[in-house]
Amino acid sequence: MSSQNDRRPLHFETLAIHAGSERDPTTGAVVPPLHLSTTYERDVDGAYSRGLIYSRLDNPNRRTFEHRVAALEGGETGLAFASGSAAANALFQALGAGAHVVAADDVYHGTRHLLNGVFAPWGLATTWLNADDPARLPELVEAALRPETALVWVESPSNPLLHIVDIAALARVTRARGVALLVDNTWATPALQRPLGLGADIVLHSASKYLGGHSDILAGVLVFAEGSALAQRTRVIQGQTGGVPSPFECWLAARSLATLPQRVRAHCEGARAVAAMLAEHPRVARVHYPGLADHPGHAVAAAQMSAPGGMLSFEVRGGAAEAFAVVAGVRIFARASSLGGVESLIEHRASIEGPGTKTPENLVRVSVGLEHPADLVADLRGALDALDALA
Ligand SMILES: *Cc1c(COP(=O)(O)O)cnc(C)c1O
């Protein structure tokens, strides 16, 4: 969106509301209409002058969502999918059999299963890098690159230890070698971190999390930097394989993006309060939150993110039993997986990730919602205090 008498770039909050949508030309509706039609009429000469043919290929609500996310990430092309996993699937298909992927071993467990369980037998090989010390990732990536490497995949902050990758440092390595760098930006969101501006080529979101923001949408999106050859190949796969969200899902997602900046600010405020309480609590052995000065990624996070985010995890003194007792002892937090919704969620993470996970057994992961921070702090403190009765 640009106005004729003022060429200053619009701020993030303004783009979140206006990018990708215009007043409906037929009715003047301020809110974009929902277009459920699967098919669009041809001109008398058979042409499609409006550019819309069939809704698997494209539809107005998907356009709005795709353009809005692309604008917020500072990218050229946005492509929406039925889930974050469907987005990853389409990108891997676009790379083609015979290509090679380099990925940090702390990426979302579903991405790990997709690469190992579905794409390894298909012919896409992955080299997994130990991400325990994210400062070493640029040199580990450099050493892992092969002539057929097409993509490097990282997540920052990562799940569930909130490792921070220096995206600009990693992009210098991948750019020099002509390999695409993807950052899964689901946890940070473009409200806090814009990887394309730091040199990454592709951003992935599970829009089921903060972009949707209300735990009621399943969707995913890829945003490509200007001139990415992979964008066109992935668009073809999006249209031909059809793993796309419905118009209503896109309508909801675009609607949710309008409040992303304000929601994320409030998520961060709550997370800071919860992290500060946890850091002082005698029953807590460690807090993983990049906003804390003793977090190993604190300096890098402060440089590349505008705030530390709404996700954190902590290790309870003891083992799995103590961690489960804390999760069982809260009243406001819902005991559920996923993240980024208005309601706070808590979970014992190792048991959802299953065998082979590196997640410590005493680790509890928290998605801080939009309830009043004081209520969340009191709830979690109460569950931790109650451990004394168990001892
Ligand atoms: C949830 C999630 C995904 C997968 O997205 P779905 O929409 O559940 O398929 C990918 N990456 C991260 C970081 C996630 O949290």
Image (tube, rainbow, N blue to C red):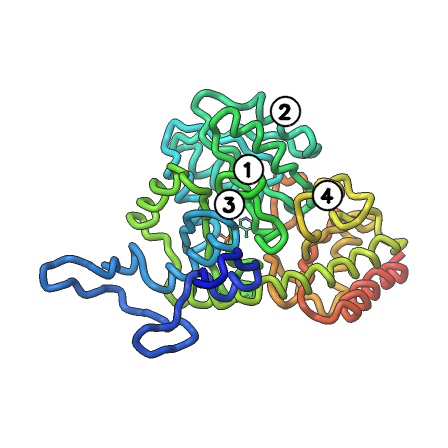
Marks 1/2: CA distance? Answer: 17 Å
The type of residue carrying mark 2 is Glu
Along the line of sight, which residue is nearer the eye, 8 or 43? 8
Residue bearing the label numbered 3: 203
Where residue 262 appears, as percent x and y from the top left, is: 63, 65
Asked if marks 4 and 3 touch (Cβ < 8 Å), the reply is no
- Residue 325: tell me if it is visible: no
Mark 1 closeness class: few <14, some 14–19, many ≥20 residues within 10 Å: many
Upstream in sequence: badge 3 or badge 2: 2
Q: Secondary structure at mark 1?
A: loop
Q: Is residue 58 above or below residue 114?
A: below
Disc number placed over residue 199 in the picture, else none: 1
| Number of the front mark, 3 or 1 | 1
Q: Which label lies toward us, 4 or 1?
A: 1
* 226, 106: nearer the viewer: 226
- Give me the residue at 59% from left, 57% from top: 338
Tag 3: amino acid: Val
The residue identified by callout 2 is: 139
Which element is circle 2 on?
A: helix
Q: Circle 3 sits in a helix, a strand or a loop, which is it?
A: strand
Confirm whether residue 100 shows in the render: yes
Q: What's the CA distance linking mark 3 and mark 1? A: 11 Å
